[in-house]
Image: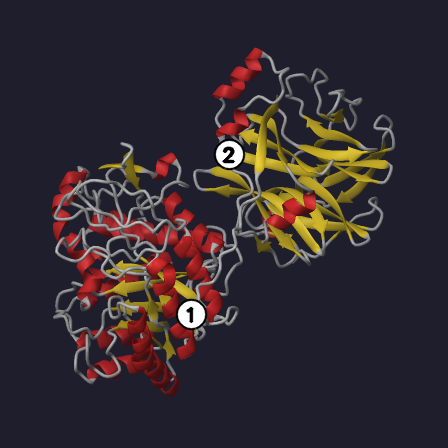
Amino acid sequence: MNALLRASVLLTLALGCTLLALAGESSPSREDVVAAMRPYGGPSTPGVDCSTLIGKIMCGYQGWFATPGDGSGRGWRHYEARGQFKPCFCGIDLWPDLSELDDDEKYATPFRHKDGRVAQVFSSHNRKTVFRHFRWMQQYDIDGVFLQRFGVETLDPKDLRHCNVVLAHCREGANRSGRCYAVMYDLSLLPAGGTRHIIEDWKLLVDRMRIGRDPKDAAYLRHGGKPVVAVWGIGFNDGRKYTLAECEQLVEFLKNDKDYGGFTVMLGVPTGWRTLDADSVNDPALHRIIGKADIISPWTVGRYRSLRDIEHHAQQRWRKDLEWCRENGKTYLPVAFPGFSWHNQRPHAPFDEIPRLRGRFLWKQYVEAKNAGATAAYQAMFDEMDEGTAIFKCNNDPPVGESRFLSLEGLPSDHYLWLTGMGRKLLRGELEATEELPQRDSVKRPTIKRLGTLDCDMVETTPVVFKDRLYRFEYVRDSYHANKTGASYFRFVDVATGKATPAFAKGFHLGCAFVEGDTMYAFGVDKWGGSKITLFRSKDLERWEERRALHLPGWELFNTSVCKADGRYVIAIEVGGPKEVVGIPFTIFFAESKDLLAWKLLPQDRVYSKEKYTACPALRYLGGYFYMLYLETRPGPTYETFIVRSKDLKRWESSRLNPVMSYSDEDKAIANLKLAGAQRKAVAQAKNINNSDVDLCEFKGKTIIYYSWGNQQGKEFLAEAVYDGTLADFLRSFFP
């Protein structure tokens, strides 16, 4: 098995003309494709340290899957075999698990599951799906990806468009999820002189997308003080047409060109690169090229087939490679893979050719790499179903019939994502390098039971316990169906009796409530986007004292939330402007008080987060941590509630179990039997894309949750949920 392991999957490119004709879409012009290339303009979320490769596991990300109807016009690219995608004609040995994907991410196929269901696949052209992949990386502590960019795929305008679209998705997904990414050129199947196409494409990426040059693109990987670009496929002895001489020119260009150089260069080379044997050309020119590079990553997929083979490879290759790299000032990036199978591409090849051994095959590589002295690793691959090396979520119930597919041996579909995250901990010295697989804690997302809809046209509410009774604070908008006053106001509803208190704070908006001893406090803004926060306090919920809490001239203030923290009080404030203060609207700022009356804005390094939409805070303090639920916008757009925590309001940790709440059909259940028929009809017919304005409290050992659902554009509904446990248990359970 030689470097054709890597290049063989590109066999599908030879079928490109057939597939394009099947797609039935006109090709764009190259000029149109280039004109659509843009620098990054989205948010960036703090996460992994993108300034170094050390301590990281970076996955290879193919991003090459396409389907009819996905907008790429490329047909069943990389799903098909021999020009077709149907039973007996298939190019993948694993089937993706789509259980978490939305309907607009799924594409029907001619395959069927054993119960007769239509089998579906995904497309790398779909922005939402690529974002989801990066959220999985975030959830399982995987640092990021080297995005494969095949030189031969940049020639046809339709292929170039797909490459650019996936690059833009990965760039945005990495920035939004706090991961790293870098471009990796694959030279496979290039003709003689073909590296000139790489140079011209790189100029496009730098000029049009500012790759490696864009200060707003915080997720782009750097190493040794420079942005990283990788080139795979130098020095293999499998008859490649391009020459070592032109590869050397390419490396020199990426490192030293006055306009397009200045990069840290990583090379994907053969296993036998150091000794010029095995899969390597026997040419000293390869060493000269490697000497000009910075990071060396020998390809090892298929180079060992058993646990004993891995030990031998580590002794004979990795240890000696690492010694050479240390002596020559290079960074070494060994490759690990979970197993191998390409039977559907090549029917004469054995099915499950290199078994995964329920993760022991992959874990053994991490252990041996760590013991050899490796400080980082390249995980092959995140999404490579063609050769059965994918670590992302795959299906234990694949289609049945004339094409055979691997399962994960009954393991959870996320097993290899989790194991890769454990490999990261191992390489970083956070786990002991033992042969035994790490034990997986059964970390489960806290169970939130949705009870259904309580009211229409009601959004901002706060559950509070006052004098041993559960109340619901309500901001009643002027458009509320039962509001006959013509103005907004606040009120409290006794949950047990349904009785509402007299209205107060008329003309105020977007309130929240907080209890201290025998006094109820409510906070609200003078208008949507106003600059003043006013507090109201009462001991009987009927007579209210009013006073100014905070005034921030020129600022646009919205929702608030208050908590008590170590002898002081902290208020979270949703801020929409001014732009120079906020960054990307909305951003959550904080103020503090010693007495709940006089408030002082905290320094502007204590925020969350100027790089993305963060709204509707619910702030709590527990055991030295501030826990904050907030609303985040997702592709679609949709809106989901996330949770983060911080000890100092500056450095925030996001839960790997996020999101806390996403929109669901269960939101439309009827919890309030007094809702009229017209209201119930409105609930049933309403568009639902959000779970927002979540607020919560503990009452009688349970966590009471109120939230809003709807279209996030004025047609919202109030719903209730419950967690069967204390508030402390609920908050802590998101950070296992």
Q: Quadrant of residue 267?
A: bottom left
Q: Quadrant of residue 255?
A: bottom left
Q: Tell me how far mark 1 sits from mark 2, CA to CA.
A: 43 Å
**Which mark lies nearer to you, 1 or 2?**
1
Quadrant including the N terminus = bottom left
- Does residue 120 appear to the left or right of 466 in the view shown? left
Q: Amino acid at mark 2?
A: Tyr
Cβ–Cβ under 8 Å for marks 1 and 2:
no
Rendered view: 265 above or below 457: below
Residue 687 at x, y percent in the picture: 48, 26
* Tag 2 residue: 663
In the foreground, 209 or 151: 151
Residue farthest along the bottom direction in this orientation? 327
Rendered view: 307 above or below 444: below
Residue at image position (54%, 28%) is: 667
Residue at image position (69%, 54%) is: 625
Q: Amino acid at mark 1?
A: Glu
Residue 632 at x, y percent in the picture: 54, 43
Residue 20 at x, y percent in the picture: 16, 43
* Tag 1 residue: 435
Residue at disc 2, secondary structure: loop
In the foreground, 453 or 172: 453
Quadrant including the C terminus = bottom right
Q: Residues within 10 Å of mark 2 (few under 14, many from 20)?
A: some
Badge 1 or badge 2: first in the primary sequence: 1
Rendered view: 296 above or below 56: below
Q: Residues within 10 Å of mark 1 (few under 14, many from 20)?
A: few
Q: Is residue 555 visible?
A: no
